Amino acid sequence: MSVNMENTKTRDIADAILKLKETMVDQRAMDNNDNYSSTISKDIKVWRHNLIDIYANSIINDLETSYENLKNWGEQAVNLLIDLDLPLDIAIEEIRNYRDRIGEIIKNEAEKQELSYTDFYEVLSRFNSVVDRAVHWLSISYSRKYYTRIHAAESVALELSVPVIKVTDTIGILPLVGDIDTKRAHELMDKALVKGSQLGLDHIILDLSGVPIIDTMVADRIFKVIDALGLSGISATLTGIRPEIAQTMTNLGINISTIPIYSSLHIAMKTLQNH
């Protein structure tokens, strides 16, 4: 493409796109039946404007500059999607929508300016490259942000699923609810030891009334926790073991005769406080 072509015709095409930017954004809102709040609608409108700006300027900027702009836009777009709890396909559909509309503008401007096939192909290729990169960056940024948030939520849930509650100066309760998988079993060990020491406890009651199934792995982990607590100077008591679970533990060959076991948390607390 000639220098003159680069400086004038491409600029004219970019200007034609920018001139129709507001119309395209408004039309998209109508076609999409946007029913967001005024604040969200304003954010999405700015987001759409920024995307069209990048598309238009991609025709006159070098690709590296356009890619860098897209990278920043993708991160901002993902933050908006995550904050508004919107799925990724909404953003990708926006990208595709403007590809079609702007592609048509490029075609019409190329005919009006009588661009050669080679020049038209170069402009369109540059634009399509930027569009493809937009999908690429958006997908990467969304996946990274989404899984970071999921991981953080899982960590919080895991933290809350193994709480050590101090009920007296020396006694704490570790109530377990739900299934205990490998990850949660490790958390159980760490939490019991760390929290028991931090809270200055002499005794921890492990309440199993909310655990539906005791298998070999779970039983082994529970008794390892009890052994580890003993080495730390903290004694342990089990409560809430239903008859069927006690039978399962016996069938697994687990010796529970050396560990204080009570049918309920209330009885355990009353017994410990009377000692």
Image (cartoon, rainbow, N blue to C red):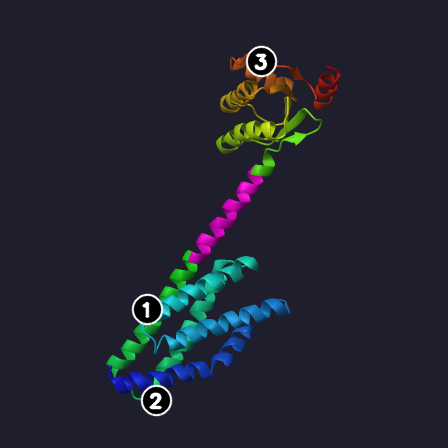
* Sooner in the amino-acid sequence: mark 1 or mark 3: 1
- Name the residue rendered at 56%, 18% in the picture: 230
Q: In the displayed orientation, state which residue is furthest to the top.
A: 257
Helix, strand or loop at disc 3? Answer: loop
Q: Hey, which quadrant is residue 36 in on the image?
A: bottom right
* Residue stretch in magenta: 141-158
Q: Quadrant location of the C terminus?
A: top right
Helix, strand or loop at disc 1? Answer: helix
* Sooner in the amino-acid sequence: mark 1 or mark 2: 1
Q: Position of residue 27 (x, y in %)?
A: 53, 77
119 is within the stretch colored magenta: no
147 is within the stretch colored magenta: yes
Q: Position of residue 222 (x, y in %)?
A: 55, 22
Do labels 1 and 2 touch, CB within 8 Å?
Answer: no
**Which amino acid type is shown beneath numbered disc 2?**
Lys
Residue occupied by mark 1 = 64
**Which amino acid type is shown beneath numbered disc 1?**
Glu
Residue 83 vs 269, above or below: the answer is below
Residue 182 vs 133, above or below: the answer is above
Q: Hey, which quadrant is residue 107 in on the image?
A: bottom left
Residue 226 vs 52, above or below: the answer is above
Q: Nearer the viewer, mark 1 or mark 2?
A: 1
Residue occupied by mark 2 = 112
Asked whether, in this view, residue 130 is left or right of residue 268, the answer is: left
Residue occupied by mark 3 = 256
Rounded to the nearest angstrom, the CA distance separating label 1 from label 3 is 68 Å
Say whether residue 194 is visible. Answer: yes
**Which amino acid type is shown beneath numbered disc 3?**
Ile
